[in-house]
Amino acid sequence: MAKLWSGRFDGDTDALVDELNASIGFDKRLYKEDIAGSIAHAKMLAEREIIPQSDLELIIPALLAICGDIESGAFEFRQSDEDIHMAIEAELTRRVGNAGKRLHTARSRNDQVALDFRLYLKNEIGAILGQLCRLLDTLCTVAQDNLDAVMPAYTHLQRAQPSTLAHYMMAYANMLRRDVTRLEDCRERMDLSPLGSGALAGTTYPIDREATARELGFEGVTENSLDGVSDRDYAIELLAALSILMTHLSRFSEEIILWCSWEFKFIELSDRYSTGSSIMPQKKNPDVAELVRGKTGRVYGSLFALLTVMKALPLAYNKDMQEDKEQVFDAIDTVKKCLPVFGAMLATMTVRRDNMRRAAAEGFINATDCADYLVKKGLPFRDAYTITGGLVSLCAAENLTLETLELARYREKSELFAADVYDAISLETCLSERRTPGGPAPAEVARQIESVREFLEARQSS
Ligand code: ARG
């Protein structure tokens, strides 16, 4: 079949070139945006009397019918059509003849593809934001249920200071809340229509870029036609935001994997969200968390692929840029697959408070509080630190904890110790006293939950 651009050519392209060149296999998912863009463009052309009104009356219903056929599976995609833009235009022309041939007046595939991609990504960001907000809501619920589930928090993976599962959940909630705003920022920046940039130098026709932008729901139009067709920052920025989001999910996954190991046993995953081993009957594996951690590499890969594709391209459009779509589509699909499963895994896990508490009691995580006790009695912190260090090493040698060490032994190290030390270093006190903003005290974490809930409500009502 003759190509839309065959006018200048004498011979056919090699079949292997067709195969390499064709993007229809993956860019067909832009069909809805392509059709919406064409309808807006056609309306504007008719409004500006660049095409007759009678053409518009043929074009719109035919494009809508094509859309219906694509959705029902009746539309036949051919590799010879190269990409979704040519496939739809060729079919339109088959259906409405000359009116179809006039649709591409004052437009290029370069501004067309940039338009379609922006429209598509804006929409997908909305879908990801919805999933992300649901995950945040799950984190708030898990936190609410575990405000006093004391556990050790770690540095260097060594037990460090007291925290709670709620405090941990809200740490991740804060990361994900930033991801929400990062995606919103990215969507806001991409919310400009490149349509009317033409091939790269605009057009001599009296088009109305503002009208098509408005019709398609954009905030405004891009400022420079060369940039309008060459810019893929918005896709790179989205991949960067998704990469950061996946970093957060990956770190979280790592905690989950550790926590459900026999060594920790802080949580147990529901059977619905774990898998077994083909040979070891005792195994219950955290595959969901491992896959999320693994797929993070895949999303980073997309970011680096697109950065690399773009890094040496002169202005304006170059065919290299066709490589943008598969990377971005794959990253979006990956993130959309991970988010809901991750949330469901968290919502259905069983928290083993007993084990968390035991780990908290055994790890000298109240040593800072013991030192602070001496400070409150007037000792400089550094001296208090040294005395407490001595107590910890004594306990470790004799298999004791600060709670079980006798008062007499305390007083051998410092006369400032009295019977109230036990209350000061109890896990309950250590926790409830850490009520500075951001801390793990249950009342303070309840405030953190409230703050995230308000953030979510503001998005639901907007
Ligand atoms: N399929 C192409 C892409 O995805 C559309 C733009 C084609 N433009 C061109 N000048 N060949 O980038």
Image (cartoon, helix red, strand yellow):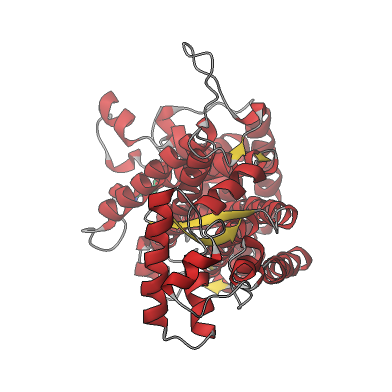
- Above or below, comparing residue 199 to residue 74 in the picture: below
- Above or below, comparing residue 426 to residue 419 in the picture: above
Q: Residue at x 25, y 30 (%)?
A: 11
Number of labels in the image equals: 0
Quadrant where the C terminus sits is bottom right
> Residue 412, how many percent across, how many down?
44, 70
Q: Give the residue furthest to the right.
A: 461
Q: Residue at x 55, y 69 (%)?
A: 188
Instruction: Tell me if residue 47 can be seen.
Output: no
> Residue 199, how many percent across, how many down?
37, 60
> Residue 100, how many percent across, how many down?
57, 45
Q: Nearer the viewer, residue 298 or 151?
A: 151
Quadrant where the N terminus sits is top left
Q: Give the residue furthest to the bottom.
A: 378
Q: Give the residue furthest to the top.
A: 279
Q: Residue at x 54, y 44 (%)?
A: 30
Q: Nearer the viewer, residue 82 or 393?
A: 393
- Above or below, comparing residue 141 to residue 459 in the picture: above
Instruction: Tell me if residue 274 can be seen.
Output: yes
In the shown orientation, is residue 199 left or right of residue 411? left
- Above or below, comparing residue 384 to residue 36 in the picture: below
Q: Nearer the viewer, residue 387 or 55?
A: 387
> Residue 249, how many percent across, how many down?
50, 49
Residue 73, image quadrant? top right
Q: Residue at x 57, y 57 (%)?
A: 168
